[in-house]
Amino acid sequence: MLFQTIEFAVFFFLLVAVVLLTRSNFSRKTCLLVFSYAFYMFWNPAFILLLLSSTVFNFWTGHAISTSSRKKQLLIFSIIVNLALLAYFKYFHFLEDNLLLLLRLFGQQPSWAATNIFLPIGISFYTFEVISYNVDIYKGEIKPAKQVVDFALFLAFFPRLVAGPILRPDDFLEQLKEKKELDPEPRYLLLFIKGMFKKMIIADNLSLFADQVLDHPGNFPSMIIWVGVLCFTIQIYCDFSGYSDMAIALASFFGYTFPRNFDRPYFAVSPSEFWSKWHISLSSWLRDYLYIPLGGNRHGSWGTYRNMMLTMLIGGLWHGASWNFVAWGALHGGIQVIYRALSLDKKLKSVSQPILLFFAWFAFQYVVWLTWITFRVVDFNQMRIALTKFVCFDFDFRLANIGLGNMSFFSTLFYMIAFVLLHAFSKKSGGVENYLLRQKTWVVSLVLVLVGASFFFLWPLKEAPFIYFQF
């Protein structure tokens, strides 16, 4: 069930009606939990059993870790079980395919049939959440949830269940202690509309061009490869940040606060700044529960570089069971190591000249654009072609006979310019929704009419699924 569908509209209005009938905090949380399970079961009812099993298991381990004298052993046991479930559903095919390849390299011809395993939506997100829950209890930073309904809602709350943001247990469980009232403030509606605009109008329309180019990069000159890569750069941001905007708006409507997940990362001039602005809930989770436990920067330069690389490699593999995601993580890890070794992060903080900041921005963002090729193109031969044409510009500016059509090319440029203007204006105004709230009613009304017209005329004929659903 997607946020932009009629099914979700019906689901939402039924939920609001039932929530309004509840009186106690417990009954309201129970209502939200039941509807969240219904929301999750809309994709595949069978996977609710996995979510329920994870809920019961980790509710028990949390209490066991809190009271047992063998806290560390229980924590390790819980992490192994949770990661084993994630590995089975997400990485079994990856391991199986690589094992078959390895056996064939040694002259073997295995004949077993491939196992048919479906990836449960959202498993990567709630697996990280239960790990942080058990770790925080072990460290004494939080107490285990007293009511199973609280812990279940922490894992299953429908706005962020399938694609984040990743919630921290200390923050969200604390919010569940008091009854929340519906909070239909205008800024939440504007935030939801902004998220839908980014997803449906910008991301899904740009995906048409990006898919045509990056699926077959050998058919196009460098200029078209550049446009295709920039299309995907914008697409993945608008797709995921659009979902996050809608999720945050929905949670806020029901009285709950979600952490900000994006903060205009394409203005970043360094890796540390980029990862403080991109998928913030994941990057901060990797920092707190992987990088720092590995040793962080406490064991000299080489230890720091090792921990950076391991964190980014695991972060890349988290995104998908494929070597291209490992390559993407390795590239970002290498960028972080280079900037750290040359102290570029510190040096850039003291730079005030606009021209130097522009070149620093362009140099870093160029590498970010290049890494998106490794993220998007799974086949390594096609990846090599795309990277070669992206780096070694061929100065072929012809639009004829490329199989896309001039209208497709120029309409794509229109959506790209719309994104750049929206991105730049958001940085200047502190967010479009916040800017509109400061304007007169007729200005807001005019903007909403224009947005409504864009939804009517520019709604894509083929809707693309949210990219992060597959992770």
Image (cartoon, helix red, strand yellow):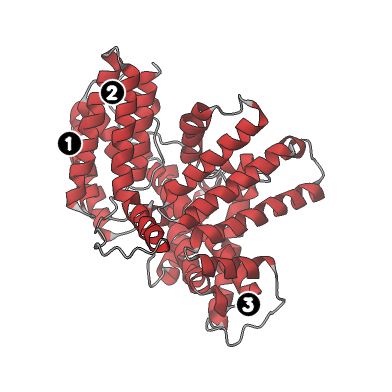
Q: Which label number is shown at residue 21?
A: 1
Answer with left or right where residue 137 lies relative to residue 309: left
Q: Disc count in the image?
A: 3
Identity, as a three-letter code, of the amino acid under mark 1: Leu
Q: Residue at x 46, y 66 (%)?
A: 454
Percent across and percent down for residue 47 are 21, 48
Type of residue at label 2?
Gly
Q: Secondary structure at mark 1?
A: helix
Q: Quadrant of residue 225?
A: bottom right
Mark 3 residue element = loop
For residue 345, above or below residue 221: above
Mark 3 vs mark 2, CA separation in Å: 56 Å
Question: In the displayed image of the protein, which residue is found farthest to the bottom?
Answer: 401
Dot 1 alpha-carbon crowd within 10 angstroms: few under 14, some 14 to 19, many 20 or more: few
Instruction: Work out whether residue 234 or residue 10 is closer to the camera in this orientation and state it.
Output: 234
User: Which residue is at 76% across, 47% downward?
Assistant: 357
Residue 253 in view: no
Identify which residue is drawn at 32% across, 21% down.
73
Q: What residue is pinned by disc 2? A: 62
Q: Residue 406: image x %, image y %?
A: 57, 82
Asked which secondary structure carries label 2, the reply is helix
Relative side of 314 to 88, left or right? right
Is mark 1 in CB contact (under 8 Å) with mark 2? no
Amino acid on which the number 3 mark rests in the picture: Pro
Work out how far the residue at label 1 is from the one at label 3, CA to CA, in angstroms.
Answer: 61 Å
The residue carrying mark 3 is: 221
Does label 1 or label 2 sit earlier along the sequence?
A: 1
Residue 158, quarter of the rendered image = top left
Q: Earlier in the sequence, mark 3 or mark 2?
A: 2
Q: Residues within 10 Å of mark 2 (few under 14, many from 20)?
A: many
Q: Quadrant of the N terminus?
A: bottom left
